[in-house]
Image: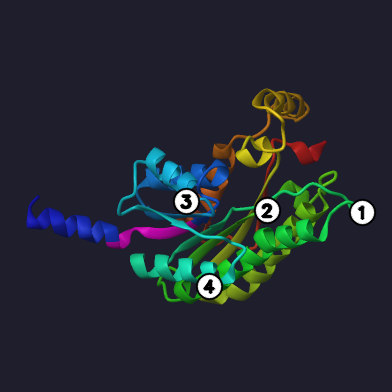
């Protein structure tokens, strides 16, 4: 490689925008990383609780490189969140984008939801995104091009899911977190938007079925009732997330974008 080629590569690396994705080891987070890396415009840092799952995701994405890194982080622990953000910012000289995608889905209604279930849902689905936003603002506000934050809520935040009290309440609060943060951070050219997926074929949903065949039966029956005739795939949601991170959404903030195959029309 010639010195001039080295210069071009170094310059390209400096122009790449660093995006941090939580829950990046699978599902929507993984699909979003794929979308971003394909463009050649971004570095991606995947955060997740399970290191083996992150490493497997990195392998599928082509292996750790200058454009992809993984960082184990327990979103239930404030110290780990702060440390992860600082490490990513230090390693890549700043942070441009944040995708708050990680979440938990405890079952339970008003009477049956336990205090532990409630606390975990509020910690992972709401407190962690708040702390992550709070942590990245310091770095985004220094960028000449500002920053992009995308929160992954749910249609349950607009129309509560049956027997999913803590999940639905936490996702509704995330929508309000989006709007409030957007109103405050606009002065720093930081946009904050929200994507609300419906039923998407991901490990989060798979985990609540006794077998993969049972999960597939559920997806087929529920999807058949939607106007578009199917449940979503992670790529269906990764596209809108990528849009909000891109230059075409530079004048969009505080938006709540539903991606549900028409489910809320029923």
Q: Which mark is residue 153?
A: 2
Closer to the N terminus: mark 1 or mark 4?
Answer: 1
Residue that label 4 marks: 135
- Which circle, 1 or 2, is nearer the viewer? 1
Give the residue drawn at x 59%, y 61%. 75
15 within the magenta span? yes
Label 1 – label 2 distance at C-alpha: 24 Å
Q: CA distance from mark 2 to mark 4?
A: 20 Å
User: Looking at the image, is mark 1 or mark 2 earlier in the sequence?
Assistant: 1
Marks 3 and 4, the one that precedes in the sequence: 3
**In the rendered image, which residue does mark 3 sit on?**
51
In front: mark 3 or mark 4?
3
Q: Is residue 183 left or right of residue 167?
A: left
Observer-nearest of 2 and 207: 207
Q: Earlier in the sequence, mark 2 or mark 4?
A: 4
Residue drawn at 67 percent across, 38 percent down: 207
- Name the residue beneath numbered marker 1: 111
The residue positioned 55% from the left and 76% from the top of the image is 187
Q: Residues within 10 Å of mark 1 (few under 14, many from 20)?
A: few
As drawn, the label of residue 184 is: none
Tell me where the magenta segment starts and ends, as one range.
14-20
Report, in whole angstroms, how far the alpha carbon at label 3 lies from the one at label 4: 22 Å
């Amino acid at each position: 490689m010639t010195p001039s080629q080295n210069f071009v590569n170094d310059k390209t690396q400096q122009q790449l925008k660093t995006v941090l994705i939580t829950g990046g080891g699978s599902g929507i987070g993984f699909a979003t990383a794929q979308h971003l890396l394909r463009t050649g415009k971004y570095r991606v840092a995947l955060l997740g609780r399970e290191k083996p799952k992150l490493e497997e995701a990195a392998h599928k994405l082509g292996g750790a490189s200058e454009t992809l890194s993984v960082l184990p982080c327990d979103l239930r622990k404030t110290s780990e969140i702060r440390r992860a953000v600082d490490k990513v910012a230090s390693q890549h000289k700043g942070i441009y984008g944040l995708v708050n995608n990680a979440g938990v889905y405890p079952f339970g209604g008003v009477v049956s939801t336990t205090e532990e279930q409630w606390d975990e849902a509020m910690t992972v689905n709401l407190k962690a995104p708040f702390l992550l936003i709070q942590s990245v603002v310091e770095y985004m506000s220094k960028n000449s091009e500002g920053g992009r934050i995308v929160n992954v809520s749910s249609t349950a935040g607009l129309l509560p899911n049956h027997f999913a009290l803590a999940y639905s309440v936490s996702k509704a609060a995330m929508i309000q977190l989006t709007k409030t943060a957007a109103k405050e951070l606009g002065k720093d050219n930081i946009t904050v938007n929200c994507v609300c997926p419906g039923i998407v074929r991901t490990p989060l949903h798979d985990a609540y079925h006794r077998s993969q065949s049972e999960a597939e039966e559920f997806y087929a029956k529920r999807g058949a009732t939607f106007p578009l005739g199917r449940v979503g795939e992670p790529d269906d949601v990764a596209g809108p997330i990528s849009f909000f991170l891109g230059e075409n959404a530079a004048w969009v903030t505080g938006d709540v974008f539903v991606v549900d195959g028409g489910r809320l029309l029923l």
